[in-house]
Amino acid sequence: MVVPRVQAAIASAFGEEYRGTDPVVRPSQFADIQINAAMALAKKVGMPPRDAAARIVEALDLDGICTAAEISGPGFINLTFDGTWIEELLNAESPGAPGVPAAEAQRVVVDYSSPNVAKEMHVGHLRTTVVGDSLVKVFEALGDTVIRQNHIGDWGTPFGMLIEHWLEIGEDSPEAALLVDDPSAFYQAARAKFDASATDEDGFATRARLRVVALQGGDEETFAVWQRLVAQSKRYFNAIYSTLGISLTDDHIAGESSYDAHLAQLCQELEERGLARISDGALCTFPAGFSGRDGQPMPLIIRKSDGGYGYGTTDLATIRYRVRELEANRVLYVVGAPQNMHLRMVMATARDAGWLPDTVEAVHVQIGNVLGEDGKILKSRSGAPVKLMALLEEAVDRARAVIDASRPELTEAERAVTARQVGIGAVKYADLSVGHDTEYVFDFDRMLALSGNTGPYVQYAAARIRSILRKAGVLERHTAVEATGTGVDGGTPGTTDGTRIDGGTPATTGGTETAGTGIDGGTPATLIAVVEPAERALALHLLEYGATLHKVREVLEPHRLCTYLFELAQLFTSFYDQCPVLKSEDSVRESRLALCSLVLRRLSEGLDLLGIETPENM
Ligand code: ARG
């Protein structure tokens, strides 16, 4: 909240070049916040930290926002805000205003999910799907134009074998249904046939090889079969996406095959421009900064010695397309960490070729592995890849058992809905709440726990507030605000008249008569009064919502939003323990209900940006 002011103070104390300095805002034991920038700045400007802190405080414009600014310890600046100012800011956000300033809009291409046709999506794909979908939602909420790209693996040599197998068993056979229900089993069956006939001159393997040639040579009949086969896989992907509530549709698919027509020209161009050369029979680029163990430059193979193209070639065509045709100024690859070297080499080559100008940011958002309890990549007991759908079903079943025991009075249908929201939410939250590049152990008990930084914990706080508002008879009014709320797009204000929580009397708490006008422009809404320490802590945290989203957008880390929501849920819990809501009277009750409503709004908006639903009952 005060970051711009602190930065202005730093600039005026030490010079414009320091304006970008991170003020290092931390919670404080003695005040509302603590600013720790003086310590690092002191070294740069060559003065004792306490003096640097004093200079900052001197230059700081605290008028109307702080009642105290004190320097303590080695050079901490402790700020105590003016309660009225907190109330003003909070009431400006409540209940219908967005609370989140829009960013300077970008055109962001986000490559995520990107599973392979006729293969099981593994937990790594699950994680890129979940993290990617959250990032795109945050970008959109802040006003960016997002272009989702599902770069499915739908091309290459295995397709000869897959098509031949499919034709042999019959497209309508029960074995063919495996493509949708158990793609890994389908793939294994084709593979087994291929391996068994490897030496057989006119056997399956030979036919499979001819099939690839026909497919890549543009044989119409083969192409049509391939299309049908890919369509089956899309059904499988879409079943997973719909179970998970992922925003990807068929329109976002731009698989490897879609770049095929450009590969020959691309290689030719790189060769002609001297950016690629033949090495051991293959055409390769050698982008600067990549060398193998032997110290020799590392090749990115773009045309194999047999004339075929590979993953690198497709990715070069892809990045060129994203910049040239899709006109991206930010290109993100939400892809497994093991592909980092590959993607960096692709980006470096694209920079050399001028296809990725400096004005375009390209980032590999590395996704860490999901491990089993043995610390190795998660596998099923038989060693086969885990079936994703079964995994999700188990999460829902486990959540169901908990809700059956804890809320037997809910109807069957209500419990089924909550169990799905909690089970799926828990799995997604587990993927989102740790740094995207860290590995973590997949553990149902931990992710479904109702305590700690888990999806269910945050969902529970939201459901609890719903129940409080319901008891107070104001849930409907809250929901009306939600439904017509403006989201966080920073755009058009809502126009509902159902925005008031107070049921009539304009509140007069907090002494700010003008701050709390309802979003219909006329009626004053309930003013939230920030009086008790627990209210104050909650209020200060609420005001950090917008900054948190902007940070997620900048550093591409949805876990920051998880932490924010987790802390919000915790602060709400302390507030609710310390400040009676339903038992309070008059304006205090109204103010606290309005505060509850704002917390609920932020919790459910935040969960929504993580792709997680907020249960009605829990
Ligand atoms: N299909 C690949 C895999 O499953 C991921 C593709 C990622 N995107 C890309 N442009 N390379 O590993």
Image (cartoon, helix red, strand yellow):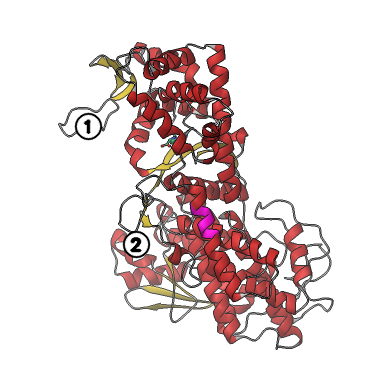
Q: Is disc 2 placed on a helix, strand or loop?
A: helix
Q: Determine the image quadrant of residue 291.
A: top left
Residue 586 painted magenta: no
* Residue 8 placement (x, y as % from top left): 49, 60
Amino acid bearing label 1: Ser
Q: Answer with left or right where residue 123 lies relative to residue 549.
A: left
| Magenta-colored span | 391-396
Q: Residues within 10 Å of mark 1 (few under 14, many from 20)?
A: few
Q: Is disc 1 placed on a helix, strand or loop?
A: loop
Residue found at x 33% / y 41% = 338
Q: Residue 177 has which mark?
A: none
Between 332 and 315, the one lying in front of the other is 315
* Residue 617 placement (x, y as % from top left): 66, 69
Q: Which residue is mark 2?
A: 41
Q: Is label 1 or label 2 in front? A: 1
Q: Earlier in the sequence, mark 1 or mark 2?
A: 2
Position of the N terminus, as image quadrant, is bottom right
Between 307 and 518, the one lying in front of the other is 307
Above-or-below relation of 258 to 53: above
Q: Answer with left or right where residue 341 lies relative to residue 179.
A: left
Between 401 and 424, the one lying in front of the other is 401
Residue found at x 51% / y 55% = 428
Task: Point out the quarter of the image occupied by ligand 1.
Answer: top left
Q: Which residue is mark 1?
A: 291
